[in-house]
Image (spheres, rainbow, N blue to C red):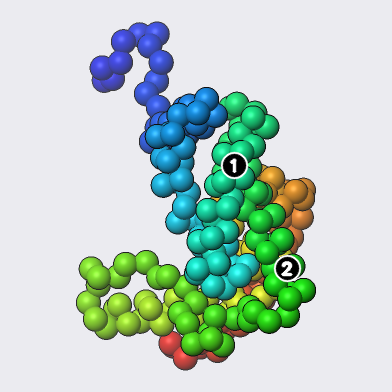
Amino acid sequence: MSDRAPGSPAPLSAIEQARCEEVRLVSDAKRGDARSFEALVDRYMGAAIHVAMSYVRNRDDAVDLAQEAFFRVYKSFDRFRDGEPFAPWFFRILRNACLNFVEKQRRRRHVSISAREEGESDWELPDTGSLCPRDRAELNEAQRRFWIALDELSDKHREIIVLRHVEELEYAQIAAVLDVPVGTVMSRLFHARRRLRGLLEPYLEGLK
């Protein structure tokens, strides 16, 4: 039997609580509250770097672009409508910053777009310290293969895989970020997954 008094509102789920907290943070940040803005940065910085790296393949550039995106958010908060989801708006700003950067780099023709060609590590992998050495090695190899295969995709396919399967955005959120219909998101994701699966098949076959 529930302890909730008759007529009282049902308790919010953890997801609903997180959304309400984010709405509060955005509202306070818009009013100039520095701590709320810093909390938003902490909440989204890791995701922003991962998304930026899917475009530029270089961690230093990705960090710079993530920071630039947050600066643009801070400067344009007055155009954000209260109550709307923050993530699609933010990732759209980040995407535009990344595309502008890539276009400038292509024009200059002197910066490699592949971190591997420069002998650097392409991606920052999550902490695997709690795993045994064998499991950690296998996980690291699977992650490495995934990012290598992801790097072979077209820009459109790579970004939609990252938004859906790395940052776990919903279809409607991805549509808002990319400014395309949800149907286009579903179609593009289908083809991106098929292409990625084809690239990973040789590795997956070797595990059998």
Q: CA distance from mark 1 to mark 2?
A: 21 Å
Q: Which marked residue is nearer to the observer: mark 1 or mark 2?
A: 2
| 163 sits to left or right of 79 | left
Residue 196 x, y percent position in the rendering:
62, 75
Which residue carries the number 2 mark? 104
| 3 sits to left or right of 119 | left
> Residue 18 lies in what quarter of the image?
top left
Q: Residues within 10 Å of mark 1 (few under 14, many from 20)?
A: some
Instruction: Identify which amino acid the numbered label 1 is placed on.
Output: Val
Q: Residue at x 54, y 64 (%)?
A: 62
Q: Residue at x 55, y 47 (%)?
A: 70
Foreground of the two, 184 or 84: 84
Residue 150 x, y percent position in the rendering:
59, 75
> Residue 117 lies in what quarter of the image?
bottom right
Q: Residue at x 63, y 81 (%)?
A: 112
Q: Residue at x 58, y 27 (%)?
A: 83
Note whether residue 202 is visible.
yes
| Sequence-earlier tag: 1 or 2 | 1
Which residue carries the number 1 mark? 73
- The image shows residue 132, relative to residue 52, as above or below, that is below
Residue 94 x, y percent position in the rendering:
62, 53
